[in-house]
Amino acid sequence: MHPLIVTPLYPPATGGAATYFGMVVPELLACATVERLTVLTERLSDQPGEWTDGKLRILRRLPSRISVPPRNRGSHAAGYALTQLWFALQLPRLVRRLRVDLIDVHTRYRGPLVYTALRRSGVPIIADLHDKMTRPATLKGIADWLLCCGEGVQRFAVAGGFPVDRIVFVRLPMAAPDVPSADRVAALRRHHGLGDVPYLLFVGDITSSKGVYELLAAYRQWRSEPPQARLAFAGTNREGTRFLRQIQHTPGATYLGRMPHEDALALMRAAEIVVLPSRSEGLPYVILEAVALGARVIAPPGVPEFDAHLQGAVLPEVSVPAIVRLLTMVWARHDPTRYPLALHEPRRAVQSLLELYTRAVGGSGAPRPRRNIRA
């Protein structure tokens, strides 16, 4: 079997998709039924365009749109157009040349030319849905299967009109991160000007859908009362000057910029609370990693796994009053947040993913003719 994984982010890029596929790919390569595996992802300036190691081939050929922050709205629109054209002109040809048996595509890639290219590829398509940013109904004529990584995403897909019999739930894989050393944590705190001051930490893309403006407003209210703590943001700024102006007008808030995943983990380790007031999450790695590192968290609403296991640490809604109330409650507690990370054991998740791959290509690992799913 030769799967093609299409993802905007792959290590050393950072983000949830990079973390996910960085865990999944090594496990798939260890499976005998996977004879070859190709990852198609965005170009990075410091990485080769093609790299091969045994069964694995990494092709960094897609326009750099999601892996780097947009310079302005014009560059963002241009990146979208170039991505659409690349898929239309290159993807079907690449699938034929490499003799790919199936495509596992992250749903961050969407748009008319992307969908047309996927239909023209002639192989089974698995759409990998990790958040609530893509309308499921638009995928039902594109994907043979819709892979959902969390219970909330699965419910979102059903409610959004994707056929239930073609939805597969595979729990998000999660390996506990290495605990950073105290020296490394201290060095990073000094480097980013955090020193010994307690701080709250947001990690992720800086977008309005992730509640960054509500968090800043809530922090301004909450910080006016003791105890004092700084608020730090780490991630790609996709809001541009609007966000930076808000930071400048919020005493105690700071934007640390983009950083390697390992640096973000080290800062999570020392944070008083890791906060993610997002509206669009499926099952965010940031919260799982923070819990694994012993941090207290404020988790986003709409994630059934968090509702079940993080009582008292989940926002009921993304609003300024709700964030202020939960900040006050979680700050007053001193025990780290607990969550059953064993639910996300990587090998179990990848075994389920491999079973879906085998099912998609016809049960034996050999390719099969693709059925018509245009209706």
Image (cartoon, helix red, strand yellow):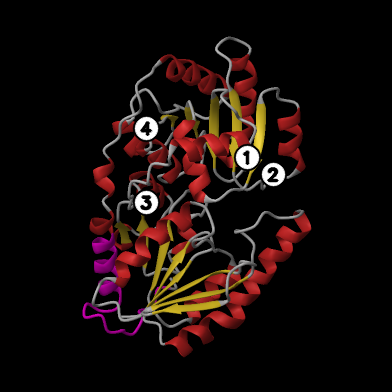
Marked residue nearer the N-terminal end (3 or 1):
3
Residue that label 3 marks: 158
Indicate which disc, 3 or 4, sits on the residue closer to the N terminus: 3
Q: Is residue 234 left or right of residue 179?
A: right
In front: label 3 or label 1:
1
Residues drawn in magenta: 350-373
Residue denoted by label 2: 239
Q: Going from the N terminus, do you reach mark 3 or mark 2 first?
A: 3
Q: Secondary structure at mark 2?
A: loop
Asked if the residue at tag 2 contacts the one at tag 4, i.e. Cβ–Cβ closer than 8 Å, the answer is no
Q: Earlier in the sequence, mark 4 or mark 2?
A: 2
The image's mark for residue 208 is 1
Mark 1 / mark 4, whichever is N-terminal: 1
Q: Which residue: 29% across, 32% down?
A: 309
The quadrant holding residue 111 is bottom right
Q: Is residue 304 above or below residue 261?
A: above
Foreground residue, 195 or 56?
Answer: 195
* Closer mark to the observer between disc 3 and disc 2: 2
Of residue 66 and residue 124, the one placed in the foreground of this image is 66
Q: Nearer the viewer, mark 3 or mark 4?
A: 4
Residue 165: percent from left, percent from top: 28, 61
List the residue tagged with mark 4: 294
Labelled pair 1, 4 in contact (Cβ < 8 Å): no
Q: Quick one: 359 or 61, which is closer to the camera?
A: 61
